[in-house]
Structure formats: C-alpha cells, structure tokens
Amino acid sequence: MRNVLYFAKDADEALALPAKNVRFIHPESATNVAIYYAGDDNAAGSVNLTVTSGEAYNVIRAIALALVGGKGLVTVADGVNSSFMHSGIEAVASVTITA
C-alpha cells in the first residue's frame, strides 16, 4: 500500500499527495513550513503550513516520519475538520499546483 499525505485548506482546496512525489520539506520562516512536490504529469507544487513559532523542525520531523512509516492515507493537516497530525500545525496556508 502506498503512503498518501492528505492536506485540506478548506472545502475548495485539498490535496492527496503520494509520498513518493515529495521532493523536499523546508521551513520558510518560524511560522511556515513548505512541502514541495512533483506530480506524475510534470506539474509541480507546494503546500504551505502555518505552524506554531518554534515548532517548524518538529513538524518537519513528524511529516518525514509519516513519509517513511505511514500506511495508506495520512492526514497531515485538515483545516475543514480541524485535524492535524502534529500539535504544532495550525492551518494549511496554501495549496499550489503549477503546470
């Protein structure tokens, strides 16, 4: 079974991302973590998470563990249902897909 990471900003912006497509995770600032990915159709994109100040590296570590250890669907951040895999994640700031 493939690992798939799930992100939802709101009812109109959500992404189910195969773990194999994640290219890197980067702390953009003290309160923002970006997950960069490449799509199977050469599209590229990113998901930006708003995180508690000082928790960026802990959030990155939790996502990395989910990439290698999760089974099936892993909800990283679901703003619709207020469900977050780590207490340091506050919201999905944006979901961006570029072709």
Image (spheres, rainbow, N blue to C red):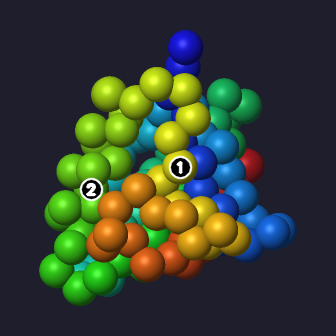
Q: Position of residue 98 (x, y in %)?
A: 69, 55
Q: Is residue 28 visible?
A: no
Check the image and report above or below for 15 versus 86.
Answer: above
Q: Looking at the image, is mark 1 or mark 2 earlier in the sequence?
A: 2
Task: Quadrant for residue 58, please give it.
Answer: bottom left
x, y percent for residue 53: 23, 85
Q: Nearer the viewer, residue 48 or 87?
A: 87
Query: What is the spatial separation of the Cα atoms under label 1 and label 2, in whole angstroms?
Result: 14 Å
Quadrant of residue 17 in the image?
A: top right
Residue 54 drawn at (x, y percent): 16, 80
The disc at residue 48 is none
Residue plotted at (29% across, 82% down): 52
Q: Could you say whether the residue bearing mark 2 is in a helix, strand or loop?
A: helix
Q: Residue furthest top?
A: 1
**Amino acid residing under circle 1:** Thr
Q: Nearer the viewer, mark 1 or mark 2?
A: 1
Q: How many marks?
A: 2
Q: Residues within 10 Å of mark 2 (few under 14, many from 20)?
A: some
Residue 21 or residue 2, whichever sits in front: 2
Residue position for label 2: 60
Query: Can residue 76 be seen here?
Result: yes
Q: Which residue is mark 1?
A: 75
86 relative to 49, above or below: above
Q: Does residue 77 sit above or below 40 in this rendering?
A: below
Position of residue 26 measured from the top left corner of the image (x, y, whole percent): 30, 60
